[in-house]
Amino acid sequence: MPELPEVETIRRDLEPRVVGRRIERVAIHPGGERVAITHAPRELEAQLAGLRIEELGRHGKYLLVHLDDDRTWVVHLRMTGLLLLRPLEESSGRFERARIDFDDGTGLRFEDSRKFGTWHLVEDPREAFPRAGPDALSAGFTVAWLREALGRRSVPVKTALLDQRVAAGVGNIYADDAISLAGIDPRAASNGIGPRRVRRLHGAVQQALLDGLGDRGSSFDRYRDAFGKSGGHHLRVHVFRRDGEPCERDRCRGRRISRTRIGGRATHYCGSCQRP
């Protein structure tokens, strides 16, 4: 699933190319109707047509397309969604579920092999994610917030970080790497992590996300940026999907990265430098 760095990469790609553009036409293709959440597919097409894009924002894994009628089109890519910039004359891809044509001869193609992606057209973007906590790269994601959120439940810290009420935008890739950077065992109880380690984890979460953003995201699976290109961060992760490989820290002396399951999610860690 595209996480915060991947969605932010797409937002930055699109911003200079679609802000100010008027939506000429929207077509949700047969088989793609599940994308429309707040309106029936034909109604959503009609509601979006003619509107101008004023600003692009993001909250966690959600892309926020602010429109000139004061509504927001909220796009959630979920597992396999892609937003691709394409000339209008370019033919459709195999997994194209919808297209958006702009007034300058360009357009967006929404591809989604698993058909889990969603579109909301709402007055207040929070309607699309009412339970989400602060964006993990925002000013609202503070050490104090993280300390309070982790202290509410006795669950593995990995489980806590994946909860979008705690740190919106963090998914499996960046949770594993952040917990590794902080030197914490992912199985450690969230409410048992002391203040110093909470501070370290807070910094590690933001470092992991910024590292991923600097590499334009991670393309372990289907993720591509708005130009259809792969990100590069999957080549530089610390522990995610590196089970069986040596830990990168010298003090671990080649200790192999382990893989386990926490809350049903594959989890990767070094048993030498990550402590309970």
Image: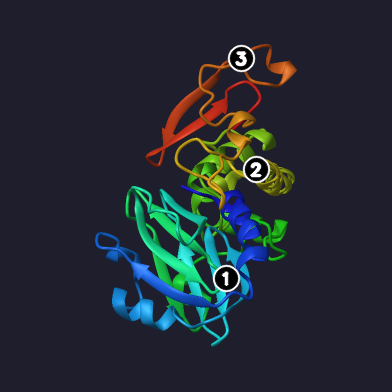
**Drawn side of residue 197 relative to residue 135, left or right:** right
Q: Name the residue under label 3.
A: 255
Rendered view: 264 above or below 68: above
Q: Where is residue 82 in the image (x, y as percent from the top left)?
A: 46, 53
Q: How crowded is mark 2: few (under 14 residues within 10 Å), some or many (20 or more)?
A: many
Closer to us: mark 3 or mark 2?
2
Question: Considering the numbered disc 1 on the image, is that residue within a helix, a strand or a loop?
Answer: loop
In the rendering, which numbered label is found on residue 104?
A: 1
User: In percent of the image, x 37 and y 40: which residue is there?
Assistant: 264
In the rendering, which numbered label is found on residue 134?
A: none
Closer to us: mark 1 or mark 2?
1
**Drawn side of residue 56 relative to residue 86, left or right:** right
Q: How crowded is mark 3: few (under 14 residues within 10 Å), some or many (20 or more)?
A: some
Question: Considering the numbered disc 2 on the image, is that residue within a helix, a strand or a loop?
Answer: helix
Q: Which of marks 3 and 1 is nearer the N terminus?
A: 1
- Give 48 or 186, whichever is nearer the viewer: 48
Residue 102 visible to an observer of this rendering: yes
Residue 148 visible to an observer of this rendering: no
User: In percent of the image, x 63 and y 33: which residue is there?
Assistant: 180
Q: Which residue lies furthest to the front in this view?
A: 89
Q: Position of residue 207 (x, y in %)?
A: 71, 44
Q: Label 1, label 2: how many angstroms apart (C-alpha)?
A: 32 Å
Q: Name the residue under label 2.
A: 212
